[in-house]
Image (tube, rainbow, N blue to C red):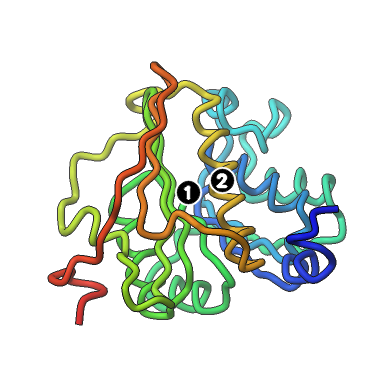
Amino acid sequence: MLPEIDAEGQQRLTDARVLIIGLGGLGSSSSVYLAAAGVGHLVLVDFDEVDISNLQRQIVHATKDIGRLKVDSAAEHLLELNPEIQVTKIDHKIENEELEEQIKLSTVVLDCSDNFQTRFAINDACVKHKTPLVSGAAIRFEAQVSVFDSRHEDSPCYRCLYGNEAEVEQTCTANGVISPLLGIVGSIQACEAMKIIMNLGETLEGRLLLLDVMHMEWHTAKLNKDPNCPVCSR
């Protein structure tokens, strides 16, 4: 019913392959919306098991899933929601050649991980294979989300934002997070991924969207390509 999308846009979703790395709070909400929207092939990556402490924010899992692999729990939920899609499960940490191969095969990648080492590795492979990357992060009451699209020469990458700084890891498990914040950011990631797939509107490429839910304020910061970036600069 949306003329901007129509049957052609829906077909693009059906033909798309989306790689979701991390099935925590961000991956939970984004995967649900992408499955419901009819993205034809979802590749789910997570090597962790469902814990009771996850259920506050990881809505793709349920109490009955405690102790199960997250990829198994999430795949079951998503296929119940939309049995017409294809789901591939990867229940181990993907690195190096395997990570590059999965990113090379993907239409778009969602980084829903929670550590800099993984985020840097994902970004490096996305830049190398010119695969659009939708990155999200949330902690306590604050979150950020952006799109890095190396198909465009002037697009910054994730490393342009953080350089080589690998700060002390701050995770939801260690520092806490208000649960709806992850749903908000994961939903935005899903929306940006759908826009990329359907070539619709303007994405967050070149912009960093910041949300402070304690004061319910949105801010947008402009991101420029770093000419000295160790990953995407010439």
Whether the residues at callouts 2 and 1 have beta carbons within 8 Å, the answer is: yes
- 7 displayed left or right of 190: right
Quarter of the rendering containing residue 160 = bottom left
What's the distance in space between the residues labelled 2 and 1, CA to CA?
5 Å
Residue furthest top as drawn: 214
* Closer to the camera in the image, 208 or 102: 208
Query: Where residue 26 sits: x, y (%)?
Result: 53, 41
Residue at point 50%, 57% (across, down): 203
- When the figure is inspected, residue 50 is found, relative to residue 121, above or below; the finding is above
Query: Where residue 77 sits: x, y (%)?
Result: 76, 43
Task: Say which amino acid is labelled 1.
Answer: Cys
Which mark identifies residue 112?
1
Q: Which residue is mark 2?
A: 27
Query: Where residue 82 sits: x, y (%)?
Result: 84, 51
Quarter of the rendering containing residue 171 = top left
Which mark identifies residue 57?
none
Q: Quadrant of the C terminus?
A: bottom left
Per the image, label 2 sits on a secondary structure element best described as helix
Query: Where residue 49 sits: x, y (%)?
Result: 56, 41
- 15 displayed left or right of 199: right
Task: Say which amino acid is labelled 2.
Answer: Gly
Residue at point 45%, 59% (across, down): 93
